[in-house]
């Protein structure tokens, strides 16, 4: 299907040759698709469902649901279990965002993003020459923002949960105290990161056996983390932000020029924020507002794409990909200019998610040619890492939670708080340390995202719930740094435009473009070689295909009273439910 077939009046003529190429492209696409994992791990049920990066954590959440807990109880229990069973991104030392949709129709979001310590300042990561010191911004104690996860989870539980703090924390404490058997995935991750952990005795003690790598099949226990979780269970937020845990965090800071103080910890507060809400083809999209850029960009891109019949063009076709790339280019450029912590800068959210604005922003879209990002600046690609994790939960009553949480990079700054057993984040790199200078994800930022005390660094996390007639039909989100928003965009489009079931929507290969650097990256199978050539001929740059690895969208689809949990085949993980 070309532009004309979809009823759009564009100038190019679809020739017989082009039709032939399109047929070839589709054939090659089918071959590629056959090579990539076609479907996510799935489970169906009607009683409740959890899909997360860890089969152990998903089971913890599902057990809470089976005991009569609601989706919020299960989400909080899953998140604390991820802090034990998926230490790369499940965390006590980081932060995240959650979208909560209650069965009574209430939709709200919670921001438990880290904040910059009081001693942070705008130029703290610049060296004497005024360049960003990447080691300081990522691999130091100064890279850590004040953790928000614990305060956020406990607040969510108090507000919307039905179980006690002790009940939802008990499984995580047991897992940490008694340990669990390491699988290949986790043992491999620890081995891969061993060189980084060696720099810090407490990190080495947690993630190795006296300096030797753990092997799959061995029992892994975390007694210090169990004690920290027990203090949270006993004392609530004071068990983390005051008393012994706070003292251990501050002592760690003082050993290595970190900035976080007792005052920073005691002053941390999660914030409940109005969700980003918009519609796409009649469906309601609920997602995360600033300080995440996720919801705004998701809606902005969907608004740009809505006038075009992506379903008719088809998944993996040149017109669909060209449209998505051009929407991504424009939205990510807006991110750099306008997005930041709304408590510090005026973010023009209403303008950015306005359908009229999308039409105007897309007015220079040329169906035959790629636009040029390089007129504005340059960046570079980040290596894909294991950063961040997303999970989705639903209960029998129809309450739903979509939560994404992170230490920023995989294992954060790799520094375990001595005696407390958890890793610290390196989220300060999500600020724009210097205008128009890329961060570790190659993302450009400006004044709106400059560092300031108590400010929240801009995120790309995009926990999202799609609804029809007031009922959730899709709970989704992803890790992946700058790629997160595009992963969520494609899961939503795969379901709503391409009519895929959730497992295929999650598994299907993806593309990524983020304005700068002006490159299209795609997973094997996202397009055929012929379509890649067609896009190159239109002026798209990069077009480097690489294996399978953009995102990890652990999602749940809902229809006819049945929940389908889908665990992204790009990584280990699991769904649990009944
Ligand atoms: N640390 C990645 C993000 O929040 O977007």
Image (cartoon, rainbow, N blue to C red):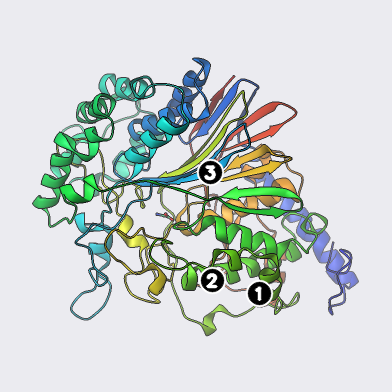
Q: Is mark 3 within 8 Å of ligand 1?
A: no
- Residue 361 disc label: 1
Q: Quadrant of ligand 1?
A: bottom left
Label 2 vs label 3, nearer the camera: 3
Q: Let me know if residue 199 appears in the view.
A: no
Q: Is mark 1 within 8 Å of ligand 1?
A: no
- How many marks can you see? 3
Cα distance in 3D space between marks 2 and 1: 10 Å
Residue at 32% from the left image edge and 45% from the top image edge = 192
Residue at 51% from the left image edge and 22% from the top image edge = 62
Q: Are marks 2 and 1 in contact (CB under 8 Å)?
A: yes
Q: Let me know if residue 130 appears in the view.
A: yes
Residue at 36% from the left image edge and 21% from the top image edge = 171
| Image quadrant where one finds the C terminus | top right
- List x then y, in percent, for residue 302: 67, 59
Q: Are marks 2 and 3 in contact (CB under 8 Å)?
A: no
- Front-lying residue, 63 or 158: 158
- List x then y, in percent, for residue 159: 44, 33
Mark 2, other Cα within 10 Å: few <14 / some 14–19 / many ≥20? some
Per the image, the residue denoted by label 3 is 108
- Residue 60 disc label: none
Q: Residue furthest bottom?
A: 375
Mark 3, other Cα within 10 Å: few <14 / some 14–19 / many ≥20? some
Please say if 480 is above or below 433.
Answer: above
Please say if 1 is above or below 467.
Answer: below
Sooner in the amino-acid sequence: mark 2 or mark 1: 2
Give the side of residue 121 with respect to residue 309, left or right: left
**Element type at mark 3:** strand
Mark 1, other Cα within 10 Å: few <14 / some 14–19 / many ≥20? some
Sooner in the amino-acid sequence: mark 2 or mark 3: 3
Per the image, the residue denoted by label 2 is 334
Q: Residue furthest top?
A: 67
């Amino acid at each position: 299907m070309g532009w004309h077939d979809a009823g759009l009046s564009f100038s190019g003529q679809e020739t017989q040759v082009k039709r032939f190429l399109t047929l070839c492209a589709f054939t090659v696409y089918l071959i590629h698709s056959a090579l990539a994992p076609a479907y996510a791990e799935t489970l169906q049920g009607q009683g409740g469902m959890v899909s997360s990066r860890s089969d152990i954590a998903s089971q913890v959440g599902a057990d809470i649901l089976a005991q009569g807990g609601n989706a919020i109880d299960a989400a909080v229990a899953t998140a604390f279990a991820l802090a034990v069973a998926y230490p790369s991104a499940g965390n006590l030392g980081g932060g995240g965002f959650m979208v909560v949709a209650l069965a009574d129709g209430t939709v709200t979001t919670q921001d438990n993003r880290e904040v910059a310590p009081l001693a942070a300042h705008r130029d703290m990561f610049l060296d004497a020459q005024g360049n960003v010191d990447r080691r300081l911004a990522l691999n130091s104690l100064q890279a850590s923002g004040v953790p928000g996860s614990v305060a956020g989870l406990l607040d969510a539980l108090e507000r919307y949960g039905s179980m006690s703090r002790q009940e939802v924390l008990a499984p995580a404490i047991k897992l940490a105290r008694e340990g669990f058997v390491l699988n290949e995935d986790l043992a491999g991750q620890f081995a891969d990161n061993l060189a980084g952990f060696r720099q810090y005795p407490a990190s080495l003690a947690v993630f190795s056996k006296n300096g030797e790598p753990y092997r799959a099949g061995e029992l892994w226990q975390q007694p210090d983390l169990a004690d920290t979780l027990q203090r949270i269970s006993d004392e609530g937020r004071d068990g983390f932000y005051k008393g012994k845990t706070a003292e251990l965090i501050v002592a760690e800071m003082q050993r290595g020029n970190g900035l976080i103080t007792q005052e920073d910890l005691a002053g941390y507060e999660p914030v409940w924020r109005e969700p980003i809400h918009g519609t796409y083809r009649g469906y309601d999209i609920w997602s995360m507002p600033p300080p995440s850029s996720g919801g705004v960009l998701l809606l902005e891109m969907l608004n740009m794409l809505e006038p075009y019949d992506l379903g008719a063009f088809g998944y993996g076709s040149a017109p669909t990909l060209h449209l998505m790339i051009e929407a991504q280019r424009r939205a990510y450029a807006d991110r750099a200019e306008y997005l930041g912590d709304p408590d510090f800068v005026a973010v023009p959210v209403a303008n950015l998610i306005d359908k009229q604005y999308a039409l105007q922003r897309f007015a220079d879209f040329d169906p035959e040619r790629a636009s040029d990002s390089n007129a504005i600046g340059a960046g570079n690609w980040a290596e894909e890492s294991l950063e961040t994790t997303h999970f989705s939960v639903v209960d029998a009553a129809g309450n739903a939670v979509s939560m994404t949480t992170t230490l920023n990079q995989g294992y954060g700054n790799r520094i375990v708080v001595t005696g407390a057993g958890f890793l610290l984040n390196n989220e300060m790199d999500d600020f724009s340390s210097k205008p128009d200078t890329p961060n570790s994800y190659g993302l450009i930022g400006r004044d709106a995202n400059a560092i300031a005390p108590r400010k929240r660094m801009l995120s790309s996390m995009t926990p999202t719930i799609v609804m029809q007639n007031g009922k959730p039909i899709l709970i989704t989100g992803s890790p992946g740094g700058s790629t997160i928003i595009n992963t969520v965009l494609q899961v939503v489009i795969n379901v709503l435009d391409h009519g895929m079931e959730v497992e295929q929507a999650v598994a299907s290969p993806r593309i990524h473009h983020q304005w700068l650097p002006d490159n299209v990256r795609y997973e094997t199978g996202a397009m055929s070689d012929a379509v890649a050539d067609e896009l190159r001929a239109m002026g798209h740059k990069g077009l480097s295909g690489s294996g399978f690895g953009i995102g990890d969208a652990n999602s749940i689809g809902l229809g006819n009273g049945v929940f389908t949990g889908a665990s992204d085949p790009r990584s280990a993980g699991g769904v649990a439910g009944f």
